[in-house]
């Protein structure tokens, strides 16, 4: 009890001395901190913060001056004055001038707007008209007092920059007459980066406000008053902390202030930029400036605490060495041993014997028992590993193995004996190798009995061997029966096919009879309609042909009468040309009439068509109008066209479509494009032109005999497309379609099926 009382007294004395040392360190550190804090505040307010604000002011003022100087230069330029007064304003003259100015002053965008034309000319965009809807800024500033204006805008109609600082400057001549406006646009992001990048500490902030307190430039763009929206929430009178000193800031040009914001004490210095009418404000947290000294105070306190702890540690090290260390070693050894027994760890080290005392004897006894138990656990582990290997062999099909290792745990030894008994029973009932049994069964499934089991011993192995032998003996009989069934099946199939063939022939005959009965009346009606159409076409033909044949004859009689009244050789020549032209037109119409008759009546055999040769012949036949009217004729053919049809019919279709495109051509740069390509079970012929086109009113009548669209220029006789239609009706399965727009052209597409076997 005396030793325990003495040890407690030493501990108390050590604790008191340590506390006195710690308190002396604490008092000295706090006193030094407050002394340094007072000196730092004085240094920052009188020297560092004013110098910082002056440097930021000079950098920002220098950057913004580029735009101001450029706007003043443009407003005084005689070249700009003359351009704005000119009635003819050439972009090829002004735009390079603006680009060179912008490049020289390192300005993103420069614009001018002459008042007399109200067109906006830019160094970056094409010239465009200024309107109140897209350029309200121009009309607002024009009506304002003053020659110059600074503004932050997001007007995308004027600039591609999303947020822009504008310097707008009115332009007057020497007589004071308003000529227009010059506008310099600077990327506000550059200005914001310049302002907010001034070195005011990690958490400091530099921003700018106008004379009314609206924030113009700030690192937080959501606080910036853009487009002069005058949002009260973006005014320093509404900002936390700043609202108290805002009236003082806006009432003076320079000053240093202290205020609180979000529980922190802030320092702020202002500088007024008279040229722009804006204030530059620099704010910084007092805690940020004094942060290094707070850190120093904390370091001193930590040192005091460490020294105090060192004194306490030296006082109690003796107790730790003589009592606590051996006791902790014994505790840790027993804990590891119990963890080893509960399988929380697979390794345990012997307890170190430090002294030959009671703790050392206890550690020796524990170490002997630990070694004995570890050996028993090792035996059980080997037996368990053998059991796992046996399980793997069973999964692989081997049933002839058994366990050999000895165990330490009695329950585990009993389990080993039961497993060996089950393995012997499996070998007797099944056999030695399941894989061999499965192999033989798979071969039996494929009807292969050539590799039976060798030396079968288990009951299942013997049964499988007997089953294979019995199946093999019955194979010959089954094969003979199968062959007989196969022959019977073939005879039945032949009889069935014969019956099906007879049924199909009867069905075809019935369908033909039904088709004849159903279509007889329909065919009579169709023939009646065709006969009626033929009568109508004959009546139209007689009426129109009599008039169209008489018209050229009347023209010839008139020209002959005119020739009797003149003696001039040149007039005779001109009259003969007109007579020749009239006769040629009459001859063309007669040829078309003959073509209709021949194509519908002539029965020529089909041949393989050489489209390149056929189109070339038609091109030679129409060479005069193609050359005379300077028509660009183009032919496009697909590769390997194999097409069989009556050549005179295909010639008639192509000739009349190409002639129609020539007759109704356009006056300038006419073209005719012919394309022939394989399509489905035939060919598709496409004839395209850029001529006069066909109005929708007349498109349903273009294939009528003698039809010519009223009011269209051309020398057609109204028979070309009629001939094409008649020829296509004669070819079974052929059809024609077209698309046309007035003054843009027409595209005809003809599909003709082929029957290559007929050739």
Image (cartoon, rainbow, N blue to C red):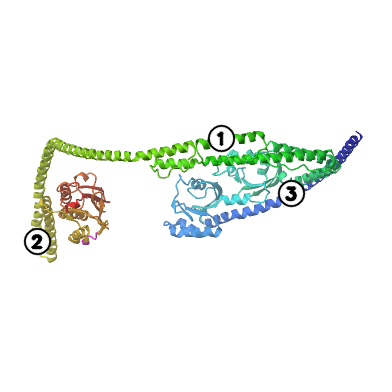
The answer to which of 566 and 369 lies nearer the viewer is: 369
Q: Secondary structure at mark 1?
A: helix
- Residue at the disc numbered 1: 422
Q: Which residues are magenta?
A: 627-631
Q: Earlier in the sequence, mark 3 or mark 2?
A: 3
Is residue 130 visible from the viewing direction of this image? yes
Q: Nearer the viewer, mark 3 or mark 1?
A: 1
Q: Secondary structure at mark 3?
A: helix
Residue 387 appears at what percent x and percent y? Answer: 60, 39
Instruction: Give the x, y percent position of residue 474.
Output: 35, 38
The reply to whether the C-beta atoms of the residues labelled 3 and 2 are less than 8 Å apart is no
Query: How many numbered marks have been drawn onto this rendered protein structure?
Result: 3
Q: Which residue is mark 2?
A: 563
Residue 330 magenta:
no
Mark 1 vs 2: CB contact within 8 A: no
Residue 551 in view, yes or no = no
Which residue position is annotated with label 3? Answer: 44
Label 3, label 1: how far apart the Cα atoms are: 93 Å
Local packing at callout 2 (Cα closer than 10 Å; few below 14, some 14-19, many 20+) is some
Give the spatial CA distance, label 1 vs label 2. 136 Å
Corner quadrant of residue 443: top left
**Among the two numbered marks 3 and 1 on one chain, the one whose residue lies closer to the N terminus:** 3
Expressed as whole percent of the image width and height from the top left, the position of residue 150 reads: 56, 49
User: Percent from the top left, x then y, of residue 362?
Assistant: 80, 38
The reply to whether the magenta stretch includes residue 628 is: yes
Camera-nearest label, 1 or 2: 1
Q: Are marks 3 and 1 in contact (CB under 8 Å)?
A: no
Query: Which tag, 1 or 2, sits closer to the chain's start?
Result: 1
């Amino acid at each position: 009890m005396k030793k325990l009382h003495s040890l407690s007294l030493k501990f108390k004395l050590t604790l008191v001395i340590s506390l006195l040392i710690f308190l002396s360190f604490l008092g000295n550190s706090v006193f030094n901190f407050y002394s340094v804090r007072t000196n730092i505040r004085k240094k920052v307010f009188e020297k560092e913060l004013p110098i910082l604000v002056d440097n930021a002011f000079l950098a920002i003022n220098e950057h913004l001056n580029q735009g101001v100087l450029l706007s003043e230069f443009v407003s005084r330029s005689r070249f700009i004055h003359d351009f704005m007064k000119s009635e003819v304003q050439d972009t090829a003259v002004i735009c390079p001038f603006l680009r060179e100015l912008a490049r020289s002053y390192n300005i993103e965008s420069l614009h001018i707007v002459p008042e007399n034309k109200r067109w906006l000319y830019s160094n970056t965009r094409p010239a465009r008209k200024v309107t109140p809807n897209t350029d309200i800024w121009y009309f607002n500033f024009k009506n304002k007092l003053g020659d110059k204006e600074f503004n932050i805008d997001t007007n995308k109609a004027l600039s591609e920059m999303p947020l822009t600082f504008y310097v707008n400057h009115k332009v007057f001549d020497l007589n004071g007459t308003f000529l227009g406006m010059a506008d310099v646009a600077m990327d506000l992001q550059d200005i914001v980066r310049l302002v907010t990048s001034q070195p005011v500490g990690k958490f400091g902030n530099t921003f700018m406000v106008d004379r009314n307190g609206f924030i113009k430039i700030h690192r937080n763009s959501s606080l910036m008053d853009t487009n002069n929206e005058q949002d009260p929430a973006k005014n320093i009178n509404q900002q936390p902390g700043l609202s108290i000193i805002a009236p003082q800031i806006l009432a003076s040009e320079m000053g240093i202030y202290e205020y609180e914001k979000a529980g922190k004490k802030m320092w702020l210095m202002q500088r007024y930029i008279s040229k722009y009418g804006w204030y530059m404000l620099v704010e910084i947290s007092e805690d940020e400036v004094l942060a290094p000294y707070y850190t120093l105070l904390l370091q001193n306190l930590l040192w005091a605490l460490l020294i105090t702890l060192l004194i306490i540690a030296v006082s109690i090290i003796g107790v730790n060495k003589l009592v606590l260390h051996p006791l902790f070693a014994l505790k840790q050894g027993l804990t590891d041993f119990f963890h080893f027994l509960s399988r929380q760890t697979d390794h345990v080290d012997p307890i170190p014997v430090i002294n030959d005392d009671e703790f050392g004897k206890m550690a020796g006894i524990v170490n002997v028992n630990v070694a004995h138990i570890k050996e028993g656990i090792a035996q059980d582990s080997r037996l368990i590993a053998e059991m796992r290997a046996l399980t793997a062999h069973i999964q692989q099909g081997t049933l002839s193995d058994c366990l050999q290792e000895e165990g330490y745990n009695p329950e585990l030894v009993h389990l080993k004996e039961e497993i060996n008994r089950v393995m012997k029973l499996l070998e007797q009932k099944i056999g030695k190798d399941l894989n061999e049994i499965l192999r033989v069964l798979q071969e039996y499934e494929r009807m292969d009995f050539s590799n039976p089991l060798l030396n079968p011993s288990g009951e299942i192995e013997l049964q499988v061997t007997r089953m294979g032998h019995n199946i093999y003996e019955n194979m010959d009989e089954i094969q003979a029966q199968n062959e007989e069934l196969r022959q019977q099946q073939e005879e039945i199939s032949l009889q069935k096919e014969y019956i099906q063939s007879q049924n199909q022939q009867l069905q075809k005959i019935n369908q033909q009879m039904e088709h004849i009965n159903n279509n007889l009346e329909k065919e009579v009606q169709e023939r009646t309609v065709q006969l009626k159409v033929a009568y109508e076409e004959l009546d139209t033909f007689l009426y129109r042909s009599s008039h169209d044949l008489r018209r050229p004859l009347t023209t010839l009689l008139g020209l002959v009468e005119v020739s009797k009244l003149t003696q001039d050789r040149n007039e005779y020549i001109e009259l003969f040309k007109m007579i020749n032209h009239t006769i040629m037109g009459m001859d063309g119409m007669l040829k078309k009439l003959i073509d209709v008759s021949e194509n519908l009546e002539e029965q020529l055999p089909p041949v393989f068509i050489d489209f390149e040769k056929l189109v070339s012949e038609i091109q030679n036949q129409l060479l005069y109008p193609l050359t005379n009217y300077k028509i660009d004729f183009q032919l496009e053919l697909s590769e390997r066209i194999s097409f069989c049809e009556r050549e005179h019919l295909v010639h008639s279709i192509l000739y009349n479509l190409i002639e129609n495109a020539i007759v109704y051509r356009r006056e300038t740069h006419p073209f005719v494009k012919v394309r022939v390509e394989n399509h489905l079970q035939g060919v598709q012929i496409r004839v395209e032109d850029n001529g006069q086109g066909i109005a929708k009113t007349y498109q349903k009548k273009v294939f009528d005999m003698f039809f010519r669209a009223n009011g269209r220029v051309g020398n057609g006789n109204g028979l070309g497309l009629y001939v094409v239609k008649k020829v296509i009706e004669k070819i079974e399965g052929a059809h024609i379609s077209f698309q046309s727009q007035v003054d843009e052209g027409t595209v005809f597409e003809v599909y003709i099926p082929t029957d290559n076997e007929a050739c």
